[in-house]
Amino acid sequence: MTVERTGEQVHQGRYDAVIVGAGWSGSLLAKNLSERGWTVLLLEAGEGGTQTWDGYLESVATFRSAVAKVPNSAYHRNVLAPSPDVLDLSPRPSTGNGTPPYTAHGYFVQNGAHPYRTDYVRALGGAGMHWLGAVPRMHPEDFATKTRFGYGRDWPITAADLQPFYAAAERELGVAGNTKEQRELGVITDHDYVYPMHEVPTSHIDEHCRKIDGATITDGMGVERELRVTGLPQARNSTPNPGYDSKKGYRPKGAVGLPNYGERCVGNASCVPICPVQAKSSPLRLQHASNDKVTLATRSVVTRVLSARGKRVDGVEYRTYTGSGTKAKAGAHHRVKADIVILAGHAIENARLLLHSGLANSSTQVGKNLMDHPTTLAWALADSQVGPYRGPGHTSGWEEFRFGKGREKRSPFRIEISNWGWSWSTGAPMSNVAQALGVGGGKNGRVKDEGLFGPELRWALGDTIGRQLQLQIAVEQPADPRNRVTIAPDRTDAMGNPRPIITYDLHDHVRKGVYAAYIASKGIFKELGAKEMTDHRPVDGVPPLGHFLYDGTDLTYQGAGHGAGTHIMGERPEDSVVDSYQKTHDHPNLYAVGCGSMPSIGTSNPTLTMAALALRSAERIHQDLLALRRKATVGAGLKAAKEKP
């Protein structure tokens, strides 16, 4: 089991590897390297607590008491390890003088034409604590968009190179899915492979949408697709698959003796940010399953990577703090040495730390090519009750516009069928209650005389809320150096570290993709016989966040929480930061791992690809450490021979 320490208690000797960030990538690498016999120090800026059952229940209670049910609402605000939050942004009228049509308060300093609307949490487990748990693989086309479609950047590896690591990641995360469906999409090529667990059952809304399987719709740009509802692979406990691992079945590593490992998914609708029964997988499971060669220290904010002789790095400097949340107090600075340094933070945090350390930037690409999945929402009223607000956020979708013809014209997109009604698009169901009562519906928010009460109110709410359909459509954003993270000496947080400065916009290829997704949603609602309610227009002259016009149509985008691309992978040191194993080109013992390495993100949630890349990197890091050990052994032998009388 992992050894837990405070930052002050960490042994200040030398480790084989120090890993910065205890999210999915960091936890996977720590577990993998420790199993090979290497000593690992895992440093986490955020607080712990949720690794105990009592602490987990406290996080559930924090979420339930929060007024705004946003991704970070299960975790306390930490002034010394701050996180961006979706509530940090507010719309404002455009002044026409170049001022962005939004205000940004909080951790990010934003100066782009449009807001970067994604978030993450700096806590033990990282964004793996508030994620949805969706783990589709990337499509083979996604790895070569420049060659095949003339936009973005190509990967230095192919989907085939990642296939065995995808399978290994699906074991470590514990993935439930329908292998046959994913094989038909072309993302699984092993004909004998099955997922560790059977798919999570589809929702009533999914089955309602299946009635238009076979219908053909257009995206408004000359691309037609025949629809078929396809299930979503999820890192969520379902029924173990007896056919997995050559019919040996599936039991996660570390499950023996693991307390509160989590029940099967029972349909709680709070996957983001927290599952009350722990059915959703998290990095905490990997940390518990790691052996005692891993030392984990929370409340340890890494401030710099330390340079050594030549191009090598020698370790990291970090600063500890005591207390919690808004009462945290900064402590002392510490230094720890390691043969290999691995940055495994969020894409933005990795870039910020590299820039502050002045490392790995001979290509000038550190911080550039910031990506997300701009997500447009469409909503409608079904012609019958569909049973929203139950189960995981989404269990199925339409995959047809992810690949194939059309990508050269506009970004591809993936259509998710939401199980949570209009919660994201309109703030339902509470907004429905307010509207029915007449609260906030009149001028200046006054109660209107025509508010509903009693049986009439109950009937209206039941009829409307029970028919809510929402589509969440994730659009690919290609790597673009104009979207970037920078730092400035006068923009610091409470710990004195530089805050990320974000410059962000949606460029024409992406805007066309958002527009095409909007047109496709209209076709879907028409086929379903649903009444379209989508409305992205400004309200009282104030455009909603992420608003833009395309071909005279009002559109908006949301953040998906899928930050990527800030230390991009490539074959040439001149135009990339890391190689295909996520080792920095400039420093032979410094790795920057995670979504920041991805040259493209396609349309699939990036966590599984990030995990596969981490496991692939573990192979190379192991070889690097073996080479260093052999060198040290040979060096010691030569020294002894010279000193022999």
Image (cartoon, rainbow, N blue to C red):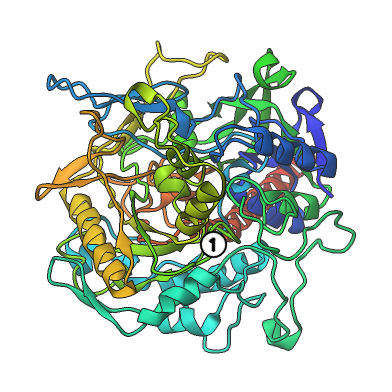
Furthest toward the top, the residue is 490
The local crowd at label 1, few if under 14, some if 14 to 19, many if 20 or more residues have their Cα within 10 Å, is many
Relative height, residue 333 to residue 205 (above, below) = above
Relative height, residue 157 to residue 65 (above, below) = below
* Residue 291 screen position, x and y as percent: 82, 52
Furthest toward the left, the residue is 551
* Residue 541 screen position, x and y as percent: 20, 28
Furthest toward the right, the residue is 257
Label 1 sits on a secondary structure element that is helix
Relative height, residue 19 to residue 213 (above, below) = above
Pointer 1 residue: 612
Say what amino acid the circle numbered 1 marks. Answer: Ala
Q: Residue at 60%, 19% (x, y): give it.
A: 79
- In depth, the one of 237 and 252 nearer the eye is 237
Horizontal arrangement in the rendering, residue 424 relative to residue 176 (left or right): left
Horizontal arrangement in the rendering, residue 322 relative to residue 229 (left or right): right
Q: Residue at 19%, 60% (x, y): give it.
A: 410
